C-alpha cells in the first residue's frame, strides 16, 4: 500500500515520461493529494485555471496510471481553493464529526474588519427571525462568510434543538431545482424548503441571471419570511451590485440587515495566525507571525492555510517552524513567482496581443463592439487571475467598480453561450501564465 507521498511521486514519475520538467513544475508543483483509496483520488490545486488545464490535458493519463497501479477504475477529483472548504465540510460530516465543532463563534477571530458582521450573526443566532431578517453578509473570498453561517447554524442548533435548519450553496440550490424539475418532484422541492425554520444560503449570487432559480427562490423567500422564519444569505457583493439579480429579489435582500466583511487589518491577521497555530499545537515566533501577517493581507483562508502548511512541513519533512518554512508555505499557497502572479498591465498586454488591439483604445471610452469585448475580457481576467478588488481594477481601467462587475457578468454569460469565446479566454490565460 502506497503512502500519499509515494503515490504522488509515482504519478509524477509516470507523467515525466511524456512531459518536460517545465510542464510538471508549471501545472503540478503546488498540487497535493487530499485523499487516496483504491477507488478514489482527491487532488488539490489552489487556482481554478490550473485545475481546468490539468483536467483537459492530463486527467486521462493520471487515471490510466492509477488504474494500472490499482488494477481497476479510479475516480479522480481535482479541487480548487474555492471548493476546498466544502470538501472538508463533507469529509468532516462523513466521519460523523459535527461541522459546528470546527466553525463556531468561539473560533471566529473578531477584528475591526468583521466585528459588525460577527455581532449581527450572533444576534440572529440568539433570536432567529426576531433580530434581523434576512441577514445578508457580503465580502471577498476567504474572509469568513461561510464560517459565520456555520456558527449561526451551530448556535441555533444548541439553543433551539427542535428547529429545522438547512445550509445550502446557491449552486446547490440551482442544481437541486433542476433535478426536481427533471424528475417531476417540484412539490417535494417546495415542501423541503418552505417548511424550514432557518435557511442559510452561501454564495447566493450564483442564482443571479438564472430565471427559474430566481423565481423559485423568490417564492421560497416569501414563504419563509411571512411565516416568521430566519433567512441568512452570503454573497461576494452587496445586492445593489448583483446586476443580473431580479429587482424583486434585490429589494427583499435589502429588507433586513446588510453587513460586510472587509480584509483583516494587521492586528487581526496576527491574531488569526496565532489562534490557528495554537489550535494545531504549534509555537510560532513573533517574527514568523509578523511575516505571514504582513505578506498575506486579504485572505483569512490563506493565512490559516500557511500555518497548516508549516505543520505539514514539520511533520512530513521534519522542518523547523521558522521564517524559511513560512516563506516556503506562502510561496506554495499564493505563488509569489511573477509568472504566476500577473498584473493588470500584463493581462491587458496579452488581451491586446491576442485581439491585435491598441491598449490605449481598451482604456479609452470608445464603445466599438470589438473593443468592448476585449475590454470586458481583460476586466474579467483581472478579477479571475489577481487578488485585486473591483475598485482597484476599476482604477486601472479608468472606470467605476460597478462597470467592472457588470463586465465580468457579461463575460460569464458569453462564456456559457459561446464556446469559441470560452476557448479564446483559455488561450489568453495560458499565454498570461507562460510569461
Image (cartoon, rainbow, N blue to C red):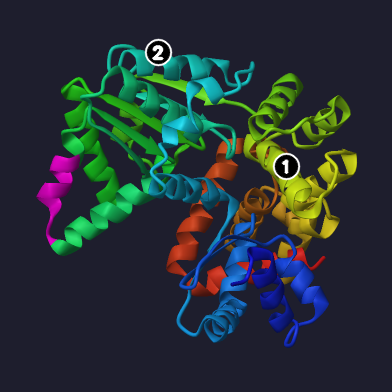
Instruction: Name the mark nearer the viewer: 1 or 2.
Output: 1
Badge 1 element = helix
Position in image of residue 421 (x %, y %) = 55, 70
In this rendering, the answer to whether 263 lies above or below 390 is above
Q: Earlier in the sequence, mark 1 or mark 2?
A: 2
Residue under the image location 62 percent in, 71 percent down? 2
In this rendering, the answer to whether 209 lies above or below 203 is below
Residue at the limit of the structure toward the front, as seen here: 1
The quarter in which the N terminus is drawn is bottom right
> Is residue 378 magenta-colored?
no
Position in image of residue 181 (x %, y %) = 18, 58
Residue that label 2 marks: 123
Is 208 or 178 nearer to us in this picture?
A: 178
Quadrant location of residue 52?
Answer: bottom right
Residue under the image location 79 percent in, 57 percent down? 346
For the residue carrying disc 2, how many other residues have a C-alpha within 10 Å: few (<14), some (14-19), or many (20+)?
A: some
Q: Does the magenta stretch mainly form a helix, a strand or a loop?
A: helix
Q: Which residues are magenta?
A: 184-192
The quarter in which the C terminus is drawn is bottom right
Residue under the image location 45 percent in, 58 percent down? 413
Residue under the image location 55 percent in, 32 percent down? 144
Is 259 or 202 nearer to us in this picture?
A: 202
Q: For residue 320, which numbered disc appears in the image?
A: none
In this rendering, the answer to whether 142 lies above or below 50 is above
Residue that label 1 marks: 306
Amino acid at each position: 500500500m502506497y503512502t500519499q507521498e509515494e503515490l504522488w511521486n509515482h504519478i509524477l514519475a509516470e507523467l515525466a515520461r511524456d512531459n518536460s520538467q517545465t510542464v510538471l513544475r508549471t501545472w503540478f508543483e503546488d498540487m497535493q493529494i487530499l485523499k487516496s483509496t483504491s477507488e478514489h483520488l482527491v487532488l488539490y490545486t489552489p487556482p481554478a485555471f490550473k485545475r481546468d488545464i490539468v483536467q483537459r490535458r492530463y486527467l486521462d493519463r493520471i487515471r490510466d496510471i492509477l488504474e494500472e497501479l490499482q488494477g481497476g477504475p479510479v475516480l479522480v477529483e481535482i479541487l480548487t481553493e474555492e471548493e476546498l472548504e466544502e470538501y472538508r465540510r463533507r469529509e468532516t460530516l462523513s466521519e460523523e464529526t459535527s461541522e459546528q465543532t470546527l466553525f463556531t463563534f468561539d473560533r471566529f477571530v473578531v477584528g475591526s474588519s468583521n466585528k459588525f458582521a460577527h455581532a449581527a450573526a450572533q444576534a440572529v443566532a440568539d433570536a432567529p427571525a426576531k433580530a434581523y431578517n434576512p441577514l445578508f453578509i457580503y465580502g471577498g473570498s476567504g474572509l469568513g462568510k461561510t464560517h459565520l453561517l456555520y456558527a449561526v447554524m451551530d448556535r441555533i442548533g444548541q439553543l433551539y434543538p427542535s428547529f429545522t435548519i438547512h445550509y445550502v450553496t446557491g449552486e446547490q440550490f440551482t442544481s437541486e431545482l433542476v433535478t426536481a424539475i427533471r424528475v417531476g418532484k417540484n412539490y417535494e422541492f417546495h415542501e423541503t424548503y418552505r417548511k424550514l425554520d432557518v435557511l442559510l444560503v452561501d454564495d447566493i449570487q450564483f442564482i443571479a441571471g438564472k430565471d427559474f432559480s430566481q423565481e423559485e427562490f423568490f417564492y421560497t423567500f416569501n414563504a419563509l419570511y411571512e411565516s416568521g422564519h430566519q433567512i441568512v444569505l452570503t454573497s461576494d457583493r452587496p445586492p445593489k451590485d448583483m446586476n443580473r439579480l431580479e429587482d424583486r429579489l434585490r429589494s427583499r435582500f435589502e429588507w433586513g440587515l446588510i453587513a460586510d466583511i472587509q480584509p483583516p487589518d494587521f492586528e487581526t491577521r496576527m491574531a488569526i495566525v496565532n489562534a490557528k497555530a495554537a489550535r494545531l499545537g504549534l509555537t510560532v515566533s513573533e517574527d514568523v507571525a509578523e511575516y505571514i501577517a504582513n505578506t498575506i493581507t486579504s485572505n483569512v483562508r490563506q493565512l490559516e492555510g500557511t500555518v497548516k502548511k508549516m505543520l505539514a512541513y514539520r511533520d512530513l519533512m521534519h522542518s523547523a517552524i521558522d521564517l524559511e518554512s513560512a516563506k516556503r508555505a506562502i510561496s506554495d499557497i499564493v505563488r509569489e513567482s511573477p509568472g504566476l502572479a500577473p498584473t493588470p498591465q500584463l493581462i491587458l498586454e496579452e488581451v491586446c496581443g491576442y485581439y491585435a488591439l491598441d491598449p490605449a483604445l481598451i482604456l479609452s471610452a470608445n464603445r466599438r463592439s470589438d473593443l468592448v469585448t476585449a475590454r470586458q475580457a481583460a476586466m474579467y481576467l483581472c478579477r479571475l487571475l489577481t487578488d485585486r478588488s473591483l475598485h482597484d481594477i476599476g482604477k486601472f481601467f479608468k472606470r467605476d467598480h460597478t462597470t467592472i462587475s457588470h463586465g465580468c457578468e457579461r463575460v460569464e454569460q458569453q462564456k456559457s453561450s459561446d464556446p469559441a469565446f470560452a476557448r479564446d479566454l483559455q488561450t489568453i490565460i495560458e499565454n498570461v501564465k507562460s510569461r
